[in-house]
Structure formats: C-alpha cells, structure tokens
Image (spheres, rainbow, N blue to C red):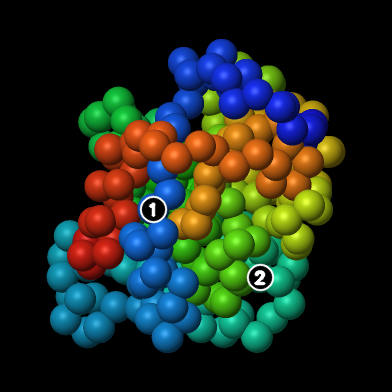
Amino acid sequence: MDFIMKNQVNNTSKYNKIGFIFSILLTFFIFAADTNFNYFNLSQNESQKYEAKWGRGGLKRVEAANKLISEGRNLPDLKKLEKVNNFFNQNIVYADDFATWGKEDYWATPLESLGKGMGNCKDYAIAKYFALLQMGIPMNKLYLSYVKSIKYNIAHMVLTYFETPTSMPLVLCNYEPRILPGNQRTDLIPVYSFNGEALFLAKQTGLGQAAPQGINANKKWVELLQKMKDGGR
C-alpha cells in the first residue's frame, strides 16, 4: 500500500468507477467525538426496543461493545486499536449488502451492523471509527480510507490510524486480522481518506493533498450520519 501522494487531483479520476467523493461533514461528527456521550450505551427503554427489533443476540453484541468502550478509554492508543479491531472483526460476519439488507448499496449504522451481526467492509470500518472516537482517540488520527483490493479486485474500505499527519498509517481491515503499517499492505491501492474534518486524495505519504472545495457529498454517507445524529438504531 504505497502512500506516495500524486500531484494532480485529476489523477484520481480513473478511480471514479470504484469510489465516491465526499465533502467535509464536520457538523455531523461533533456528537461522535464527545466521549461523554456513548452511542453504544442504550438506556433501559432503548435496550428493550433494540432487543425487540434485533433479538437477544444483537443486544448482547451492543452491550459488549459498550463495555469495551467504557473499560478501554484509559488504554494506550495501540491497545485501543487492537481491541476494537478484534471485537468488530469477531462480532460481525462478512456479507454483502444484498445478502444482509436486500439492497445493492446500504450504509448501516454501527448499531444496525451489530444488530444484524453482519456487514461489509464499510460497515466494519464505520463501526470501528465511531467506537475509537468514543474511546478518546482524536478525530485527526482516524480516517476512513477507500482503497482497491488487488487480491480480490474490488473496491474496499478500511480504517486508518495516523499517529501524526505525516506518519505511515496503521490499517485496520476486516480481511486481515493483524494491524499492519500501510507500506506492508501491498495488496491495497489507496484512493482517498476522509473523516469528519477533511478529505484527502491519495496516493499519499501521510495525509497528502486536501481535496478542493465544492466536491459533492455522497448522499448515502450524509444520510447515515444524519440517522446516527438523530439517534437512529
């Protein structure tokens, strides 16, 4: 996974067929970065409604995620990454959107993914992202990274952790249980990385080139964030 930045924004145009372009959506993420609020912590009434919708197994997975977050806030960052990566890789079974939701491209909230116990690559990455934010890792260290998997010849999404803006990222992936530096993931071609603060185009060393203003937001991503902001389960 060669994170060497290209100089021209239009060099990424060849990836349009496998990717979406996102705008900056900071306002939707403010609630997620507040560690005093735990999206995974359900009240008694919410737990009853959640169990009625998703079953006892789904509720147990959410309760386990809440426990992981609550007990892990004082751990070193690398240990947080390890625990969250293992938890979601072990508690969500890979399935494509059609098998899980009966739709070709469904963007599930973390609680929907845990309720079903199923999800695809973007669902793993999104759930890990929000869990780590709520464990106290700063937003500017966490990025959802859109890549191409050479091994499977498909578009893929992973979560990346940058210790500094120029450091080699660590990659959290549902295909690979180990957390490896990006330069050891030669099976992945990076396209772009984004979080609640910014969008950066790839290839890149560190974060690289910020995307220009005016890039259209992906409708499904906006809808997902709004659903989470509104308490969607």
- Which residue is at a point 56% across and 65% down the rendered structure image? 139
Identify the residue shown where x is 51% and y is 37%.
212
Rendered location of residue 14, percent (x, y): 56, 13
Q: Is residue 198 visible?
A: yes
Q: Quadrant of residue 112?
A: bottom left
Q: Farthest right residue?
A: 184
Residue 69 pos. (x, y %):
52, 76
- Of the two numbered discs 2 and 1 on the same chain, state the one appearing first in sequence: 1
Mark 2 vs 1: CB contact within 8 A: no
Q: Amino acid at mark 1?
A: Leu
Q: On residue 138, which mark appears?
A: none
Residue named by callout 1? 25
Q: Position of residue 83 (x, y in %)?
A: 64, 67
Residue topped by disc 2 = 80
Residue 206: give x, y in percent of width and height: 75, 47
Q: Which quadrant of the rendered structure holds the C terminus?
A: bottom left
Q: Identify which residue, 220 or 24, lies in the foreground.
A: 24
The reply, left or right, for residue 132 in relation to residue 209 is: left
Left or right, 152 with reference to 58:
right
Q: Tell which of 32 and 117 is nearer to you.
A: 32
Cα distance, mark 2 to mark 1? 25 Å
Residue drawn 65% across the image and 85% down it: 74
Reply above or below: 106 against 75.
Answer: above
Kind of residue at disc 2: Lys
